[in-house]
Image: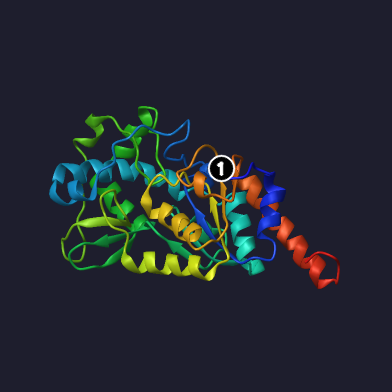
């Protein structure tokens, strides 16, 4: 991997190339959503899919923590990085956006061709009848079933949250939490997100690979690529001889495959890239020397 040449080098490598964008939790930190592995990340033991399915106690712990974490994510707004990715899409230089985040901030920023690889935090699905509910509606049911719960959390100083809307709570607050069931059939409710130990739906993986196949390069923004769900796309692009450009604070598992790695602020780098490519297009349209 060559030494970093800064955002200008990133823009130079992507000028005239259509590329796929893969984003991770590092893109949303400027929106107030902490990442998984940064210096301020919350130490956590997330509920796995297997635990959630077999244990009422695990479901109680999950929903209590999620009810708190969702409140914070629900109020998060897109930052400069999300807006820059949306601008790149409008410029027509991307084949699409693959995000490992569940916060829907790409869509809130105006992006349209987005694969929510790990699902959406704003939806809840019944595992029996398949009915889908807005998370806000389920939140209202949980508030009704647990009067005073959020006030009790606030009285203890609130809670630290993670990018999947999990939160760290005092066990005494969890033990009395009442979980609600599907209002249609009484089945188990589960947020429409991929849990640890759960497979990403095949159609999302297939669509994501298609976006990489259609691209001439892959841009990774704000992901440590620690889990295979994202790393596989980097490996595919590198295997096919396509440039891999990574913008992320700190080491990633894809660094050795990167054509260029920028250890810098993700939002700033993406904003610079969008402005540079827009300038290139303007120069080309006006007949200037910019290609």
Query: Is 14 on the left-hand or right-hand side of 161?
Result: right
Residue at image point 23% right, 57% down: 189
Look at 53% across and 67% down and name the residue there.
Answer: 112
Q: Where on the picture, by quarter, is residue 199?
A: bottom left
Which of the pair 177/113 is nearer the observer? 113
**Residue at x 42% of width, y 44% of height:** 163
Q: Position of residue 59 (x, y in %)?
A: 20, 46
Q: Quadrant of residue 203?
A: bottom left
Q: Position of residue 104 (x, y in %)?
A: 46, 57
Residue drawn at x 37%, y 43% is 69
110 is higher (above) or lower (below) than 59: below
The answer to whether residue 201 is left or right of residue 262 is left
- Give the total of numbered labels: 1
> Which of the pair 59/279 is nearer the observer?
279
Query: Mark 1 sits on what residue?
Result: 30
Q: Residues within 10 Å of mark 1 (few under 14, many from 20)?
A: some
- Which colour scheme appears in the figure? rainbow
Asked if residue 258 lies left or right of residue 191, the reply is right
Location of residue 18 in the rendering, given as x and y in whole percent from the top left corner: 61, 67
Residue toward you, 73 or 50: 50
Q: Is disc 1 placed on a helix, strand or loop?
A: helix
In this orientation, does residue 256 appear?
A: yes
Quarter of the picture containing the N terminus is: top right
Residue 102 appearing in the image: no
Q: Nearer the viewer, residue 196 or 42?
A: 196
Q: Position of residue 92 (x, y in %)?
A: 63, 70
Quarter of the picture containing the C terminus is bottom right
Q: Is residue 184 left or right of residue 43?
A: left
């Amino acid at each position: 991997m060559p030494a970093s040449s800064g955002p200008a080098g990133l823009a130079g490598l992507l000028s005239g190339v259509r590329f796929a964008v893969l984003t991770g939790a590092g893109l949303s930190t400027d929106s107030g959503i902490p990442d998984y592995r940064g210096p301020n990340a919350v130490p956590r033991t997330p509920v796995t899919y297997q635990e959630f399915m077999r244990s009422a106690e695990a479901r109680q712990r999950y929903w209590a923590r999620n009810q708190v974490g969702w409140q914070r994510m629900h109020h998060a707004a897109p930052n400069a990085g999300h807006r820059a990715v949306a601008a790149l899409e409008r410029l027509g230089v991307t084949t699409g956006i693959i995000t490992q985040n569940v916060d829907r901030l790409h869509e809130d920023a105006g992006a349209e061709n987005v694969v929510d690889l790990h699902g959406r935090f704003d939806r809840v699905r019944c595992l029996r009848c398949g009915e889908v509910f807005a998370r806000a509606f389920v939140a209202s049911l949980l508030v009704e079933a647990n009067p005073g719960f959020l006030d009790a959390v606030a009285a203890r100083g609130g809670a630290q949250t993670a990018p999947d809307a999990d939160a760290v709570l005092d066990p005494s607050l969890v033990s009395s939490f009442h979980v609600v069931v599907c209002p249609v059939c009484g089945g188990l409710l589960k947020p429409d997100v991929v849990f640890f130990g759960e497979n990403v739906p095949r159609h999302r993986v297939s669509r994501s690979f298609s976006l990489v196949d259609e691209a001439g390069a892959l841009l990774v923004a704000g992901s440590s690529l620690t889990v295979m769900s994202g790393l596989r796309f980097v490996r595919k692009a590198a295997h096919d001889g396509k440039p891999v450009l990574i913008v992320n604070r700190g080491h990633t598992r894809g660094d050795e495959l990167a054509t260029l790695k920028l250890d810098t602020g993700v939002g700033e780098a993406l904003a610079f890239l969008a402005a540079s490519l827009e300038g290139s297009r303007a120069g080309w349209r006006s007949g200037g020397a910019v290609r």
